[in-house]
Amino acid sequence: MTPVALNAARRTADVTALADGAPLDVLVIGGGITGAGVALDAASRGLSVALVEKHDLAFGTSRWSSKLVHGGLRYLATGNVGIARRSAVERGILMTRNAPHLVRAMPQLVPLLPSMGHAERALVRAGFLAGDVLRKTAGTPSSVLPRSRRISAQRVIEMAATVRRDGLDGGLLAFDGQLIDDARLVIAVARTAAQRGARILTYVAASEATGTSARLTDQRSGESFDVSARAVINATGVWAGEIDPALKLRPSRGTHLVFDAETFGNPTAALTIPIPGEINRFIFAMPEQLGRVYLGLTDEDAPGAIPDVPQPSPDEIGFLLQTVNTALEITLDDSDVIGAYAGLRPLIDTGEGRTADVSRDHAIVDSDSGVISVIGGKLTEYRRMAQDVLDHAVAQRGLTAGACRTHDLPLVGALTNPGSDVALTTDLPESLIARYGAEAGNVVATARCERPTDPVVDGIDVTRAEFEYAITHEGALGVGDILDRRTRIGLVAADRERVVGVAEEFLTRFA
């Protein structure tokens, strides 16, 4: 099977087909992880589906996460056993069946420092043991996610070289799921949906939505037209109220800082640091792709107008630096920060209290207009959210559809996906395989550019072939699509400036 190609030509053909009245069972509004998941679920059940997104895929909250596929330990500690168990199950599905090429085991290291009392240590250890039980109950083998354990002070220093040495009494080590990148997961889900016939349309805005219709506007041409569908699903996350003003959401801002990995001594584990005065809340300094470390995250109320691109506040930056320094031998300050980002969690408004304490559960809401909305939730549970809202839509609208198939459906790039290129060779860059899995060989094989395996610029391990593939196969239509979502070069402004000319050149040639 030829790897599915999302590109400008396919988009034009799909927009034209919808404008000409192509029949639709399901119209999905929103191109984040939830919307992409809904489109895949619908297409894999044999329904005709179109997804529309007014910006690019993963433009909103879905690219601003911690890149973690959580096993639900935090929710278990707060007594929400249902979310904890579902999270562990969904993590296992992603790591063993859907996307083992995009999600890997991440060591989480809690250094045992003098500031951490016996009661706190016992609580963390008990939590890690409960996490082991969750993993086992969810059916995820220890070969995929190793068991938690205590390690020596020397081993702690080997894994996180900048950890505070004075009084270090070893560490507690556990494992969770880590995405190579959240936006790449969205792209993979969307392309897998397209592989099964879904029309994936970026830069198409929806308005005047009802239960069976919507007005679509092509943001690139300015043309508008009406479409009909048997079900319209609102999966716009924190922006859901723009489609159904009756929905009540309470956005919460989560901020991360970006560092050069060398600043942290090139760690191999996520340094996990308790927040002083809090129970079961931590910040994480996580080793990431492109030689970076992401430090996060905050949980702050974000009332008022919802920006397209949220910005970190000075207080959040100061809080993260202050907290991480409690566990470091070195002292970090603003000059060490090479980038920062913030995202808004689409929490369901349950009234008063801190956003950190608001449930991460999801809900399905039928609006007076007939639009079906899925709100709340979190990235780890995107597949389950999609299944729930599609089950609801099928029942409500009498759609002729098969049962949900996504539980065992590998995404593009998984070795078991029939549309993936399994010819992985040792001469492919490791970073390319980490981002594309079994499709890595095809990225290079289909490239028409010169020197396809060379980096786009010195010092950044993104190849020239990846820029081309973003345009020819992954639906990138502009510079921001390439630099800020298909790759994450743009998280560091200085790196972005170095490659923007290369991206413009590739768009001129291959778009």
Image (cartoon, rainbow, N blue to C red):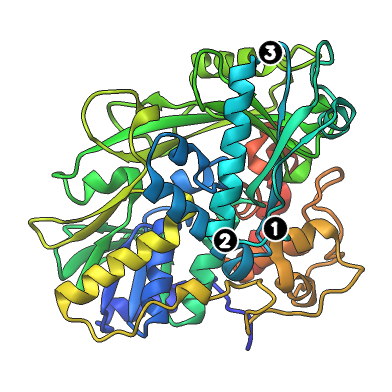
Work out which quarter of the rendered image holds the N terminus and state it: bottom right
Task: Please tell me in which quadrant of the rendered image residue 54 appears.
Answer: bottom left
Question: Which disc is residue 326 wearing?
Answer: 3
In the picture, residue 76 is in which quadrant?
top left
Query: Which residue is rendered at x = 49% and y = 67% of the image?
Result: 190
Q: Give me the residue at 53% from left, 71% from top.
A: 191
Q: Is residue 160 depicted above or below 374 in this figure?
A: above
* Mark 3 surroundings: few (<14), some (14-19) or many (≥20) residues within 10 A: some
Mark carried by residue 338: none
| Among the two numbered marks 3 and 2 on one chain, the one whose residue lies closer to the N terminus | 2
Q: Secondary structure at mark 3?
A: loop
Q: Position of residue 113 (x, y in %)?
A: 73, 16
| Type of the residue with mark 3 | Thr
Position of residue 300 relative to residue 199, above or below, is above
Identify the residue under disc 2.
92
Image quarter of the C terminus = bottom right
**Residue occupying the point 23% across, 46% down:** 242
Q: Crowdedness of circle 1 by 10 Å Cα count: few (<14), some, many (20+)? A: few
Label 1, on which residue?
A: 142
- Residue 205 on image: x %, y %: 31, 57
Q: Position of residue 150 (x, y in %)?
A: 76, 34
Residue 262 lies in what quarter of the image?
Answer: top right
Q: Residue at x 59, y 70 (%)?
A: 97
Residue situated furthest bottom in the rendering = 1
Q: Can residue 475 be seen by looking at this rendering? A: no
Contact? badges 3 and 2 (CB < 8 Å): no
Q: Secondary structure at mark 1?
A: loop
Q: Compare residues 324 and 450 and report the one nearer the observer.
A: 324
In-front residue for pair 19/401: 401
Q: Residues within 10 Å of mark 2 (few under 14, many from 20)?
A: many
Identified by mark 1, the residue type is Ser
The foreground one among 11 and 33 is 33
